[in-house]
Image (cartoon, helix red, strand yellow):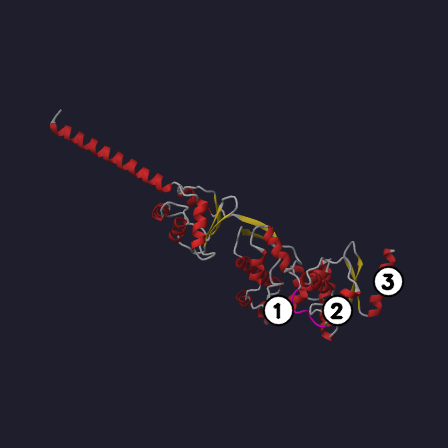
Amino acid sequence: MPRIVRRIISTLALLLGAAIFLGLLLLGVVVYFNAAPQVSPSNAVSGIAASLPEGQDGIREDADGGVYLEVRKGESAQSVGRRLEQAGLIRSRHFWYLLCRFFNKEFIKSGTYQLEMPATQMAIHRTLVSGRQLLQRVMIPEGVTLKKTAKILDEAGICPAGAFLEAAADPEILNRYRVPGATMEGYLFPDTYLFPADYPASRVVAAMADTFFKRLSEIDSTAADLSPEELNRRVIVASIVEREYRMDEEAPLMAGVFFNRLLIGMALQSCATVEYVITEIQDRPHPEVLYTRDTEIRDPYNTYIRPGLPPGPISAPGAVALDAAFHPVRSDFLYFRLTDAAAGRHYFSKTLDDHIRAGRLYVKNRS
C-alpha cells in the first residue's frame, strides 16, 4: 500500500476518532447539563424563596413537593432561565439559552405551570412551550358577598381568603376601576373562572373586575359614560335586586319599585339588607326568619330604618340583576310581596292597603 494512502487512512482514522471523542464529549455535556440537579428542588426552592423578596421569584412549592413556576407576561426566555438556575431547578442557565435558541420556533408562553420534579431541562422547556397551564375551575355564584367569594377561592386553592379581601380593598385597585366605595363589593362578576393555583390575589380581583365591566358594557353600552357615583348607585340597586328576585321577569319590576321609593324618599325596606347586616357585619348565622328586633338594628346598611341606599352593594349581582337596575320597568308600584314560595312569584301593589291584603291572602292560602 502506498505511503500516501496509509497517511490518508491514518489521518481519516484520527479525524474519525476525534469526531467520535468530541461527539461523546458533547453528548456527555448535554446529558450532564440537561439532567436535573442533584440538589433537592424542594430545598433549593425554599432557599431561594427565603433570599428573594416575597412573590418576586415566581416559584413556589406545595406540601407534596410539587413546584409551581409563573412565567410572567412578556418575560424573556433568558429571564426564566436565570430564575430556574437561581432556584436550583436547572444546572445552567447558559445551557437553557442554547436550548431555547435551538428550539427558536417554539416560544415560552406566559402562565402558571406545575413542574414534576426532578425534571430535565428539555422536559421543563416542553412544558413551558406547550402553554398547558395548571388551572383550577372555580364557580362564583350570583349574589355572594366578598367574604363568601374569599372562602370559595381559598377552598379551591386559588388564593388565601385574607389576601383576597385585602386586594379587594386595595386603594390602587379601587382607583383603577373608579369604585367610590371602600371595597370592590358588587364589582366582581359572579361567573365560572379558570385560575392557576396559588394565583396572586390582586390578579384574581382584577380578572373578576374586568369581567364585570365587560359584561356591564354588553348589558348597557352607556354604562361607561356614567359618573362613578351614578354607576355605584345602579350597582347597589342591582345587588339588592339580586338578593330579592326569584323569577327573571320580575327583577326589572323590583328595580322599578326601589327606584320609585328612592324618588319619593321612602325607605327601601329590603330584607336582603338586614340579612347583610346580620351575616356580613355582625358575622352571625343566616336567619331563617327576620323579626322586628332584626329590622330595628341600627346600622347604615339597614334600609328599614334608614331611607335611601345603603353605603355600598350587598352582593355580587349577575347579568339579570344588573340589566334590571339599568333597565327598570316603569310603574306606579311601591310594594311587592312573595305570594308563591314554590315558584318564587311576587305580588306587586301600589298602595299599602293592597300590599297588606296580599299578605293576608298569602297567609290564608298557606293555611
Above or below: residue 24 compared with residue 130: above
Q: CA distance from mark 1 to mark 3?
A: 38 Å
Where does the C terminus fall, quadrant-wise?
bottom right
- At which x and y percent is residue 199? 52, 54
* Image x and y of residue 350, in percent: 80, 69
First-in-chain label (1 vs 2):
1
Residue 259, quarter of the rendered image: bottom right
Residue placed under numbered mark 3 in the picture: 360
Magenta-drawn segment: 307-313
Image-based side of 353 in relation to 306, left or right: right
Please say whether residue 180 is visible from this viewpoint.
yes
Identify the mark at residue 260; answer none if there is no mark: none
Q: For the view shown, which residue lies furthest in the bottom direction?
A: 264
Question: Which residue is depicted at the point 58% across and 70% down?
Answer: 225
Which dot, 2 or 3, sits closer to the camera?
2
The residue identified by callout 2 is 304
For label 1, the SS is: helix
Q: Amino acid at mark 3?
A: Arg
Give the numbered dot on residue 231.
1
Earlier sequence position, callout 1 versus callout 3? 1
Q: Is residue 129 visible?
A: no
Chain-order first, disc 2 or disc 3 = 2
